[in-house]
């Protein structure tokens, strides 16, 4: 997002916290394209017939975030971290529902949903990622939180530090651990 928009986002976030009528809609209008671009990069290879395309995913994020009574988004980075978590939850819920309808055990069979960890890596099966992230969460919650924000929000290390209220060096350590963990876990699942 351009720097000029960043200041406007900050003002709109303050307006949302103050309860100004229409501020939430104006905020989403300003960040819509950026959220849609993130959704497009994350939500890959959707099974035929699934209606949750990137546009619909962003709309679901909007509904989820505006439906919460406490919208105390501190700044642009914090907002995108919360949006990333919502996007992650929606994608995982959608895949889980799809697996249940097919009566397919999660993580088995042909992958139906794929997500991209980063622009440089090939897409991976969402069920496998979900399993790996779940194990990471139970083993190292801080690394899990960093992974969710970095993967689904596409935030930089500095932005992640601001969003999570930790130092950049902590984010770097936790992200390095999370990437190694996910690589190992995903390698095991694909064997």
Image (cartoon, rainbow, N blue to C red):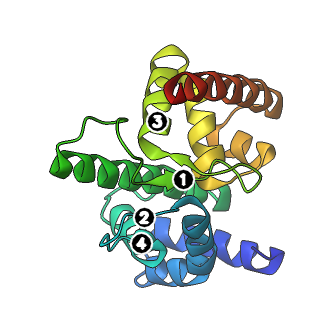
Quadrant in the rendering for residue 9: bottom right
Pick whichever, 120 or 144, lies toward us.
Answer: 120
Which one is in front, 136 or 174? 136
User: In this view of the protein, which residue sits in the foreground, 6 or 43?
Assistant: 43
- Residue at mark 3 to residue at mark 4: CA–CA distance: 41 Å
Give the mark nearer the N terminus: 4 vs 1. 4
- Of pointers 2 and 1, the one earlier in the residue sequence: 2
The residue furthest top is: 139
| Among the two numbered marks 4 and 2 on one chain, the one whose residue lies closer to the N terminus | 4
- Nearer mark to the viewer, of 4 and 2: 2
- Residue drawn at point x = 25 percent, y = 35 percent: 105
Q: Position of residue 136 (x, y in %)?
A: 52, 23
**Front of the two marks 3 and 4:** 3
Q: Residues within 10 Å of mark 2 (few under 14, many from 20)?
A: some
In the shown orientation, is residue 59 left or right of residue 167? left
Q: Which residue is mark 4?
A: 19
Spatial CA span between label 1 and label 3: 10 Å
- The reply to whether discs 3 and 2 touch (Cβ–Cβ < 8 Å) is no
Label 1 residue SS: strand
The x and y percentages for residue 122 are 67, 50
Marks 3 and 2 sit apart, C-alpha to C-alpha, by 15 Å
Label for residue 115? 1
> Dot 3: what SS?
helix
Query: Which is more N-terminal, label 3 or label 1?
Result: 1
Q: Quadrant of residue 160?
A: top right
Q: How busy is the neighbourhood of tag 3: few (under 14 within 10 Å), some, or many (20 plus)?
A: many
- Identify the residue at image location x=31%, y=58%: 69
Question: Residue 46 — which label?
Answer: 2
Residue under pointer 3: 128
Res. 148 mark = none
Which residue is painted at 39% across and 62% down in the image?
A: 65
Looking at the rendering, in which quadrant would you find the N terminus? bottom right
């Amino acid at each position: 997002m351009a720097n000029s928009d960043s200041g406007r986002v900050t003002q709109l976030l303050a307006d949302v916290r103050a309860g100004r009528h229409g501020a939430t809609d104006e905020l989403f209008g300003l960040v819509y394209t950026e959220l849609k671009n993130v959704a497009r990069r994350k939500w890959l290879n959707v099974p035929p017939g699934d209606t949750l395309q990137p546009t619909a995913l962003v709309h679901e994020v909007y509904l989820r975030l505006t439906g919460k009574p406490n919208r105390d988004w501190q700044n642009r980075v914090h907002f995108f971290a919360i949006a990333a978590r919502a996007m992650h939850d929606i994608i995982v819920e959608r895949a889980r529902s799809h697996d249940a309808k097919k009566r397919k055990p999660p993580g088995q069979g042909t992958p139906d949903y794929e997500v991209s960890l980063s622009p440089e890596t090939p897409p991976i099966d969402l069920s496998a990622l979900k399993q790996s992230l779940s194990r990471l969460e139970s083993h190292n919650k801080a690394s899990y939180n960093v992974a969710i924000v970095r993967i689904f929000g596409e935030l930089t290390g500095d932005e992640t530090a601001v969003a999570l209220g930790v130092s950049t060096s902590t984010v770097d350590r936790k992200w390095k651990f999370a990437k190694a963990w996910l690589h190992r876990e995903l390698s095991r699942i694909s064997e």
